[in-house]
Every structure is written in C-alpha cells, then in structure tokens.
Image (cartoon, helix red, strand yellow):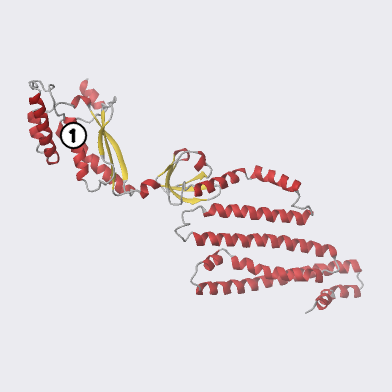
Amino acid sequence: MNRETIQKYSCLFQDYLVNEGMTIEWAIFLNVLVNCVIVFAAVLILDVVFRKLIVETFKAFSDKTKTTFDDYLVKSNFPRFIAHCLPLGLVWYLIPIIFVESAFMTNLLQIAAQVYLIILCVYIFRSILRTTRNFLEESESYRDKPMESYVQVMMIFAWGIGVFWIIQLLTGFSVVSLTTLGAASAVILLIFKDTILGFVASIQVSVNDIVRIGDWITFSKFGADGYVTEINLATVRVQNFDNTFTTIPTYSLIADSFQNWRGMQESKGRRIKRSIFIKQSSIKFLSSEDIERLKNIQLIKPYLEHRQRDVDKFNRMNEADKELLINGRNQTNLGVFRHYADAFLNENSAINKDLFLMVRHLAPTDKGIPIEIFCFSHDKKWENYEHIQADIFDHLLASISYFDLEVFELPTGRDLQALA
C-alpha cells in the first residue's frame, strides 16, 4: 500500500464529516482524534503479536544453542525490547502520512516517538549489559569481580546521554554547547558525588584486589562479619554469620581499615593464638622426687632425662650446694609444662607442623603469667577450627594440676565467703 492510498483512507472520516455539513476545522480535529485511536489500537495489537512471535522464536533458538549467552538475553528481556522496535518503525512511517492535515500533531507525535526510541535504546543497552554480566560471572576469572559496579557505571552514562538527547528534543537546546555541558557537569558532580566516589572505589578494589565476592571480611565500624555476597557501585553487601545482611559504602573499603580473611582461607592453616594465665605463686623448682614423678608422663620423659643429665653435670662441675634448690641449675614446673605443651602440639595430627609452632612465655601481668599457644590448624573451616582449639585447651587446662601449677582466676563470691 503506497503513501497516497494510506493518506486517502486516513481522510475518509474527515470527508464524511464535511459532506454532512461540519466545518472543516472540526472535521480535521475529529479526524485526527479518530486516526490517533486507530493508530494506537493498531500499534498495541502489532506490539503484542510481534512480541509473542519474536520472544518465542528467540527462546526456541536459544534452547538449541550450546552457549548460555542467548539464554541470559532472554532472561534480561532483550527479545521483548527488540519486538517494540517494529511497531515503533510503523508509527514513524505512518505519522507524516496520516496526520498530514495537522502539522502540530505530526510534530508532537514524532517527538514522542523519538523520546520513546531513546528510552527503548537505553533499555536494550541495559539488557545487553546485564546479559554480559551474568555470562561473565559463570567464568572463574570474573566470578569474584565487582561486575555489577561496571554495569551501573555504564548505565549511568547511558541514561545521562539519553536524558541529554531528550532535553534537546523537547527544548531545542544543543547538548554539545560548552555552557550546557559545564552546567550539566556541575549538577552531575553535585548529585552523583557518592556514586562517583563509589565508582572510583570499585575500580581500586578490583585493580588492587582488595576484596572479592566470597571473601570473609570483618568491618567493626559497620558491624559486618561475614562473606561478601555483592559488590556494586554504591554498596558492598555482607552476609553475617547470623544470616543477617550488612551494607557497607563501597568507598569505605579504601577509606577505612577492615580485616579480610582471604589470606587465611588460601593458606595451609588457620592460626591458633591463645594464652593460659598461670598463678605466679604456684611456680616452683622441681625436686628429684618431682622429676621422677613427672617421668611417668610419656610425652616429656625423654626431655626430662636429657635435661636432668645436663643440669646434674653442670651442678657437679660447679660444686653447687643442692641442699637449697635455688643453688645451681634447676628445672621448674612451669618450664616442664611449656615443653609438655609443645610436645603435645607436635603430636597432635590436627596441627600443621609445616607452619610456625611455638609455646612461649609472655611478660607477667596482674592476672598471672601468660603461656601463649601459637600454632596453625590444618582444618580452616570455622566450626572444625573451634573444635580443634577447644580440644587443645581442654587438655592443657586439665594437665596443669599434674605439674603442681594453678590457673589464675579472680576470686568468686564463694571464695571471699570462705576467707571471711
């Protein structure tokens, strides 16, 4: 059907009204109104038909392909947005033909069609970006990258360009003038200050590999202690261990200090660092009887025998008067206990012997003398790690009494009552 035929049919109602005696102005007005209703109804019908046809065809095509990219295109409504383009093209073609008698209506509808086309292009671009993001997140190389941040930044630019073009269509002002761009830049910097900071932060986080999706972080300032589930332009989402969620401003990841446990997760062990506070008055030199009794503890029997030979040899050479234990060299119950703890850790299969292992003596405090256990467990899973740590200290605390040592403990009400 050519332009003349379409134009002829579009004026039939107008000609009928004029023949019936209506003024030409009212006939044109009513004819334009009727044509608007017809075009609008036709566009709706065509939109539904084309959308159904294109979406179903695209789904059938994506089901037969091996790649998942087209599957994500379907999920992001890419075929649906493409289907809107065909009725829009039809409207664009028909407007100057059907509304030839009304220049105002032709101009108005053409501007509306252009605005709709710009918005439609932005939505198509968004669906492509989301599809690309979902497709890349399947890859190990991109799964822990903040892809959402990049998508949001590109969408901000896309909407910015779209808004500029819409303003130009509606007002006639050129968006390329320096004055307009300068004013727009100032407004954008003011309104999107946090977004710009988040964009800069997300780039630094990604480039410097500060945080990845799946990392366990502790951020005391925001009460976050859990796994990072999402990194986007404005916030970082953390799922805490009680299954609550905490959102952290992305910029805070480079502006404030936080703890990332990824190094521990990727290492060969998880650190155990905890102290037992020994009551200072329970520390003593070991007599011969004490040493013989402690030799019954299998883990330290070789150490006691070897160490005691060295002590006796030194005392004989220096003619130490052993009527007092303080003279010459002596072993202490705390020193023997430290070696027992060290031997116990070396015998424990849950402890990684390839990593640092030490039982050390810290400076005395008002709560006793700290004996610190420093080692690494093989198992890094949180609950298993806590079980291993608890088993170690359960055993050591129960063993202390065998060395005539006492664990420091603040007096309770019952202790004070007994003293009274």
Where in the figure is residue 99, as x and y percent of width and height? 82, 68
Where in the figure is residue 252, as x and y percent of width and height? 51, 41
For the point 62% across and 61% down, the residue is 125
For the point 54% across and 68% down, the residue is 70
What amino acid is found at the position of numbered circle 1 in the picture?
Phe
Question: In the rendered image, is residue 336 in sight?
Answer: yes
Of the 4 image quadrants, the one containing the N terminus is bottom right
Compared to residue 315, the image places residue 33 above or below, namely below
Comparing 16 with 402, the one in front is 402
Of the 4 image quadrants, the one containing the C terminus is top left
Is 330 displayed left or right of 37 in the figure? left
For the point 21% across and 21% down, the residue is 419
Where in the figure is residue 333, as x and y percent of width and height? 16, 30
- How many circles with numbers are drawn on the protein? 1
Comparing 42 with 211, the one in front is 211
For the point 9% across and 22% down, the residue is 320
Compared to residue 26, the image places residue 293 above or below, namely above
Where in the figure is residue 161, as x and y percent of width and height? 68, 54
Q: Secondary structure at mark 1?
A: helix
Comparing 78 with 351, the one in front is 351
Comparing 82 with 342, the one in front is 342
